[in-house]
Amino acid sequence: MSGMKLAGPGMTVLAAGLAAVLLSTAAGAQKATPRGAKQYLASARELDRQALDGLRSPGGLSAARARVRASKADLGAALDTLGAAELSPAKTASIQRLLTAAATNKGRALRGSASRLGTSLQAALAQET
């Protein structure tokens, strides 16, 4: 083993390439930030609007329900990340109540007709504002 040459020109190029990939990956990882409550709420609102638009088309009820389920999940994530927003306890509690009410409306909406879904979505959008 003592006679083996471990480093050569090919190995040096490989090591330099690997170092460049690792540095670019690390730089990209530093730029990525986790989604916060605002981003989840914005996503939920957009999904709600898409669901309302979907209800206007024939056969759009199942697609609207899928969007409402995704929106409800985003509201849950917004609630989970709300504490990181560093708001006053009173403001945080107020926002939590509104988001919880919106999620409750969406839960009811999923069990109802297209008309009920539309009405519940409009109420949820008002509560998410």
Image: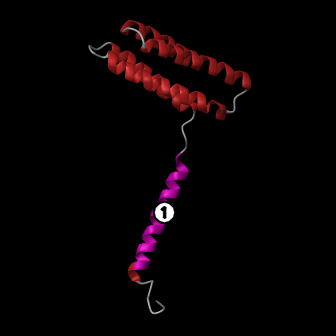
For badge 1, the amino acid type reads Leu
Q: Is residue 16 above or below residue 123?
A: below
Pinpoint residue 62: horizontal percent, then vertical percent: 33, 18
Quadrant of the rendered image containing residue 8: bottom left
Pinpoint residue 33: horizontal percent, then vertical percent: 55, 44
From the image, give the main secondary structure of the stretch colored magenta: helix
| Residue 13 on the magenta segment | yes
Q: Residue at x 66, y 19 (%)?
A: 94
Residue extending furthest left? Answer: 58
Residue carrying label 1: 22
| Residue 17 on the magenta segment | yes
Q: Is residue 33 above or below residue 61?
A: below
Residue extending furthest front? Answer: 1
Residue 77 shown left or right of residue 121 in the figure:
right
Q: Secondary structure at mark 1?
A: helix
Q: Residue at x 57, y 35 (%)?
A: 36
> Do we see residue 129 in this rendering?
no
Q: Residue at x 60, y 33 (%)?
A: 81
> Do we see residue 66 in this rendering?
yes
Residue 101 shown left or right of residue 45 in the figure:
right
- The range drawn in magenta is 11-32
Q: Residue at x 69, y 29 (%)?
A: 87
4 or 48: nearer the viewer: 4
Residue 55 shown left or right of residue 86 in the figure:
left
Image quadrant where one finds the C terminus: top right
Q: Is residue 28 above or below residue 88?
A: below
110 or 129: nearer the viewer: 110
